[in-house]
Image (tube, grey):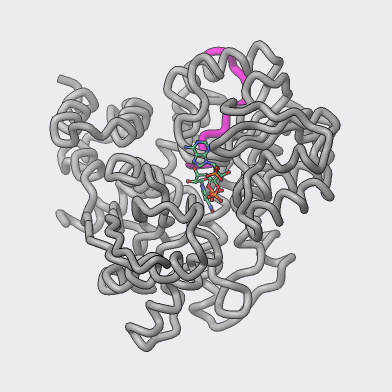
Amino acid sequence: MHIVTEVLETVSKRNPNEPEFLQAVQEILNSLTPLLEQNKEYQDKCILQRFVEPERQIIFRVPWQDDRGQIQINRGYRFEFNSAIGPYKGGLRFHPSVCPSILKFLALEQVLKNSLTTLPMGGGKGGADFDPKGKSDNEVMRFCQSFMTELFRHIGPYTDVPAGDIGVGTREIGYLFGQYKRLRNEFTGVLTGKGRNWGGSLIRPEATGYGTVYFAQEMLKTRGDSLAGKICTVSGSGNVAQYTVQKLQQLGAKVVTLSDSDGTIYDAQGINAEKLDFVMTLKNVRRGRLKEYTDMFNAEYRAGKRPWDVPCDCAFPCATQNEISGENAKQLLDGGCKLVCEGANMPSQPKAVELFLAKGILFGPGKAANAGGVAVSGLEMAQNAIHLNWTREEVEQRLHGIMISIHRNCCETAERYDQAGNLVLGANIAGFSKVADAMLDQGLV
Ligand code: NDP
């Protein structure tokens, strides 16, 4: 039996009821076949079998009290997946859907993504099935304090450095950092995405969205094209979506959609800087619903819908996993879409990826395209370690350079394996090789 088939069978047996994790493993392993055929040592040393098994899995109870005095119990997690090239690094997600399957797929993707950034970071992911939506600041603070009261013993600036993800922004990172500092009596760079005045890096909030757009720009350049004048659809309206829209505006594109878990807004005139400001205040300060956009501006609200049936040149999924089905991919292609660049993690279902690759449109997989966020987290760790802050220009320039080099690495790797333009294969092989070689060097651990 082929090594990939054998490992996939074992992973499926060992991790039943984990569809998202199996989806990610399958996508990655299928791309690695040509590499494995050339490297017998990976097979001899069971690198693949070790690669798909998290180094450590931590699951814990998070008890807290709501504003009515009622006791609530959530479940907290940290999956420390691979530390071959650096301390575990990856976000925390607070969302009711959080479970081992979702966190393990995110952690595995993170291992390859972090490897691609060129920075020394291993991969992990964590979070809780806690829903910050509708909770008061005090409730979120009590939850974060209880969560960190367990997590603190497992993390540290040289061990595991969490960051934000869905439902975890600067407010949550603040409460988590405060509690860590109190428990350890140490002011260290144990979390990234910190506030500007207490160890955060300039450009970290913007990094994932900006990086995604820089990646799209590089993809378009390979066809002698640019973002200027392009009609773009964006999903989500959180951190990644907001700064994707901002950079697209700066580069002369016209963004016509945003969404949240209730529906999509379609603004045919384009979402300009003033309208984006409104969205940022609405989502980040007032924590309201996107539907309110239509009370202020002339736009269509599509309840319960995603943006993919809106005709566009370029699509930027920036909400969540599996948000583009095979059917949605057809709608995108029928609507003239020539580029899909993933700001979110694994937003395209396997059928959709298959269609994009078969049609030869530009397709930027999340682990490469959205790596700007963790790259600037790595730069935040570097600034914390040398006790200095770099300027906005310096950080953005480094981010831009990293995105260009990730794109180049993915393209060159795909070409080397006779799959020019297949950035899924390029990202998986380039990310994996570095981790696999480090695992070989470090022996059987
Ligand atoms: P936020 O919490 O800031 O925003 C998430 C957005 O997605 C919200 O608009 C939310 O809508 C929407 N959303 C969440 N879940 C669903 C769902 N099940 N169906 C439809 N819409 C949904 O998160 P981020 O912007 O930080 O993260 C977005 C994506 O980007 C995720 O896939 C994340 O893993 C990925 N990512 C994030 C990075 C970062 O630096 N933050 C780095 C790399 C990747 P609502 O408000 O209704 O919940």
Of the 4 image quadrants, the one containing the C terminus is bottom left
Magenta-drawn stretch contains 366 = yes
Residue 118 appears in the figure: no
Of the 4 image quadrants, the one containing the N terminus is top left
The residue sitting at 49% across, 65% down in the picture is 172
Q: Position of residue 201 (x, y in %)?
A: 60, 70
Quadrant for residue 369, please give it: top right
Write down the region rendered in magenta: 358-368
Quadrant for residue 307, please give it: top right
Residue 283 appears in the figure: yes
Total numbered badges shown on the rendered structure: 0
Quadrant for residue 199, please give it: bottom right
The residue sitting at 52% across, 72% down in the picture is 382
Residue 329 lies left or right of residue 279; in this view the side is left
In terms of depth relative to the viewer, which is nearer, 324 or 55?
Answer: 324
In terms of depth relative to the viewer, which is nearer, 68 or 439?
Answer: 68
Residue 249 lies left or right of residue 3; in this view the side is right
Relative to 410, residue 338 above or below:
above
Q: Position of residue 261 (x, y in %)?
A: 54, 37
The residue sitting at 54% across, 67% down in the picture is 171
Residue 391 lies left or right of residue 349; in this view the side is right
Q: Position of residue 37 (x, y in %)?
A: 28, 27
Residue 317 lies left or right of residue 297; in this view the side is left
The residue sitting at 80% across, 46% down in the picture is 275
Q: Position of residue 395 (x, y in %)?
A: 66, 64
Relative to 355, residue 438 above or below:
below
Magenta-drawn stretch contains 325 = no
In terms of depth relative to the viewer, which is nearer, 414 or 193?
Answer: 193
